[in-house]
Amino acid sequence: MPCEVEFEDVTKRFPGAARPALDHVSLKVEAGEFVTVLGTSGCGKTTMIKCVNRLVEPDSGTIRVEGEDVSAADPARLRQHIGYVIQKVGLFPHMTVGENVATVPRVLKWDKERIQARVDELLALVNLDPKEFAGRYPSQLSGGQQQRVGLARALAADPSLLLMDEPFGAIDAINREALQDELLRIHQGSRKTILFVTHDINEALKLGTRVLVMDAGRVQQFDTPKEICEHPATDFVRSLLRSGEFRLRSAYVEPGEGI
Amino acid sequence: MQNVLAYFSQNGTEFVQMVATHLWLSAVALALATVIAVPLGILGARFRRLDSVSEGVWGTLRIIPSLALLLVLIPVLGTGTLPAVVSLTVLAIPPILINTTTAFKTLPADVLEAAEGMGMPPARELLTVKLPLALPVAFAGFRTATSEVIASAMLAAYIGAGGLGDLIFTGLGLMRTDLLWIGGLSVAALSLAVGALLSLAEARMRRRAGMVAA
Ligand SMILES: Nc1ncnc2c1ncn2[C@@H]1O[C@H](COP(=O)(O)OP(=O)(O)OP(=O)(O)O)[C@@H](O)[C@H]1O
Ligand SMILES: [Mg+2]
């Protein structure tokens, strides 16, 4: 069941902040889109997606999920149906990997066999052998493995909307690529709506059906990767593209060859 | 030494009785203190105003020596078990309260955000996430309280509540050093034994809370 998300003139200024974290943001994410949110550190990406599941309450404006104003929804029920991968992973250190993944299904009172089967399925999906990893504690995992568990946990109840805050930040390039492909497959198979925060332009362009470029709390451009590359709307987008090209190119430069 | 052996052969049951009373008084006081201090501590972590008020109140009470508190309580509560338990409870509350507040204030923010972000109902979050993660630190406060209470329960005998303090006061009254030694060392041994048990339990809780790699 795909799910659309709409921001209507949303502004949020944290107490004591010099400028708003979100500055009159209006946009509409269609059901089934994979939107990547791109911008420099502190530009309001995390704030934006936290407004969707009400971890942050905006000062003004309206956010609608499936046409319903989220400020009218019960926060707990709303969140149980929105997958959320937090930037700092936040696994429960006192629970096993399996128990972590089972969190939302347990809250939703699924029966035991169903939860067990789902946990195994999800761990396999994020490339962690359930037999080896389900019984481990987060402290016994590498940073990248923890992030994968965080992803599995967010997918547990099969939410139609997925908020992901730099979910692959701690994962090396090769595994990162594999996970990106996995996520694309999940998206194509399910038509989930995904809001995916990153500050890696190449990741944003690769994954997004549309890319939302933000700067200083404002939307700079919200368009397909192709449009963004061919017709950058602002100087900020242009400079962002240049930094991406530089990185792309420098990856192929042989040592000593110089640039 | 002979006196000591003679004491135990003649007064074995009496000694066991005193140990039992001593432990019983301490346990009741600690249980009461826990029931009062843990909820207060949890609330204190959330409401700064309450935290500073209770810090002031218990900080002041803490300065008053237990003996003085006992004497003050006599006109109000009389002598015997009740004032002893009350003063021991007062003694036990601050360390449990302070550690509970600290434990709940220092819960990892990312973990709480994850719990909240997944729509965990607040009561469930408290029981399945906050409490287990706060437990080791709060429990360390309980351990401190326990050693203070076991030592101070000696004074309970002074107002007729019994316990190992009886030996001390009898020893002082009759000028019998052997009784003083037995009483003093027994309390020390009791305190060490209980302390060791609680330390073991605490280490276990830390492992469970994922604070140390298992
Ligand atoms: N709880 C808060 N209290 C005060 N200010 C905040 C809070 N959270 C965020 N901010 C401020 O709001 C702005 C946007 O923060 P946000 O976390 O949304 O940035 P971001 O784009 O996610 O950055 P990053 O890429 O570093 O994660 C920043 O200036 C930040 O300092
Ligand atoms: Mg962020």
Image (cartoon, rainbow, N blue to C red):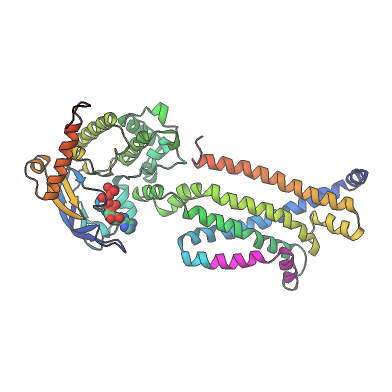
What is the quadrant of residue A146 in the picture?
top left
In the orientation shown, which residue stands out farthest toward the left? A231
Indicate the position of residue A1 as horizontal and vertical percent values. Answer: 21, 43
Q: Nearer the viewer, residue A124 or A78?
A: A124
Indicate the position of residue A3 as horizontal and vertical percent values. Answer: 20, 46
Residue A245 appearing in the image: yes
Q: How many marks?
A: 0
Q: Nearer the viewer, residue B67 or A162?
A: B67
In the rendered image, residue A17 lying in the magenta stretch gets the answer: no
> Is A17 displayed left or right of B88 in the figure?
left
Indicate the position of residue A56 as horizontal and vertical percent values. Answer: 30, 56
Please identify the dominant SS of the magenta region.
Answer: helix
In the orientation shown, which residue stands out farthest toward the bottom? B75
Magenta segment = B53-74
Identity of the residue drawn at 17% across and 39% down:
A244
Identity of the residue drawn at 38% across and 48% down:
B110
What is the quadrant of residue B71 in the picture?
bottom right
Identity of the residue drawn at 65% across and 55% down:
B30
In the rendered image, residue B57 lying in the magenta stretch gets the answer: yes
> Is A184 displayed left or right of B35 in the figure?
left
Residue A53 appearing in the image: no
Identity of the residue drawn at 50% across and 41% down:
B211
What is the quadrant of residue A68 in the picture?
bottom left
> Is B55 displayed left or right of A15 in the figure?
right
Look at the picture and state if B10 lies above or below B94: above
